[in-house]
Image (tube, grey):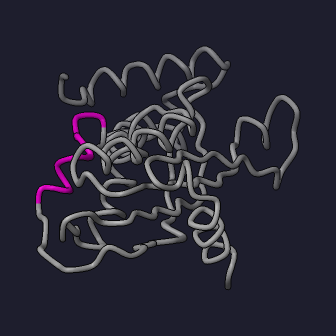
């Protein structure tokens, strides 16, 4: 994929400002196109990243029990309206054959997936699939909870409404007790 084109973004933002009936030469808006281009470069920085890259560092550890990193905060942009949605991802896996990854790698994978025009459902399944493909664990469970600004500030206007998605792979699909353990640990405060 191509690199982010700052000048194209600046031109587009200037056109939007004009299209809504404001003056892009006005003092408060003068540098807005540059600020938006810089912000877009940051919030879409995951567009050229493969989350599996974060799982290349694998440690040999005799551990085949649950690993859970919960409350991984993220921000993303809805690909339908280009407005933010934000929330927390909970990522659990049961290692197989002594293949564990660093805990920060789970959070980095969430970031890489979230920082592109996105759907919450895709974030959830992409993270789970990346772990399965990279680590070959006994099971993976990813739960994402988020508030979508496209539902808060426009349309139905329901602030505080949360969307919850899950992706369940391997043993978690078959073993209700294993699934329940993850859910109880996520809900424990």
Residue 138 lies, in percent from the top left, at: 36, 57
Residue 6 lies, in percent from the top left, at: 27, 30
Nearest the camera: 149 or 19?
Answer: 149
Point out the image quarter for the N terminus. Answer: top left
Residue 149 lies, in percent from the top left, at: 70, 42
Rendered position, 108 above or below 48: below
Nearest the camera: 176 or 168?
Answer: 176
Nearest the camera: 89 or 187?
Answer: 187
Residue 14 lies, in percent from the top left, at: 46, 23
Residue at 40% in and 39% down: 126
Residue at 11% in and 63% down: 57
Q: Assess whether residue 53 is covered by the magenta stretch.
A: yes
Quarter-wise, where is residue 94 in the image? bottom left
Using residue 184 as the reference point, say whether residue 99 is left or right of it.
left
Point out the image quarter for the C terminus. Answer: bottom right
Q: For the magenta stretch, what is the residue range?
A: 47-56
Q: Residue furthest bottom?
A: 189
Q: Assess whether residue 153 is covered by the magenta stretch.
A: no
Using residue 47 as the reference point, say whether residue 74 is left or right of it.
right
């Amino acid at each position: 994929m191509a690199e982010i084109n700052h000048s194209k973004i600046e031109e587009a933002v200037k056109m939007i400002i004009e299209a809504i009936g404001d003056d892009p030469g006005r003092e408060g808006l003068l540098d807005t196109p540059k600020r938006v281009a810089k912000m877009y470069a940051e919030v879409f920085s995951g567009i050229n990243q493969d989350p599996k890259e974060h799982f290349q560092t694998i440690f040999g550890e005799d551990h085949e029990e649950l690993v859970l990193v919960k409350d991984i905060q993220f921000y993303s942009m809805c690909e339908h309206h280009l407005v933010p949605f934000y929330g927390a991802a909970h990522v659990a896996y049961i290692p197989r054959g002594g293949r564990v990854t660093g805990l920060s790698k789970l959070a980095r994978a969430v970031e890489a997936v979230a920082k592109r025009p996105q759907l919450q459902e895709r974030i959830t399944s992409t993270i789970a699939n990346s772990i399965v493909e990279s680590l070959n664990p006994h099971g993976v469970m990813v739960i994402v909870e988020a508030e979508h600004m496209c539902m808060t500030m426009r349309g139905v206007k329901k602030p505080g409404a949360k969307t919850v998605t899950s992706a369940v792979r391997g043993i978690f699909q078959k073993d209700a007790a294993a699934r329940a353990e993850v859910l109880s640990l996520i809900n424990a405060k």
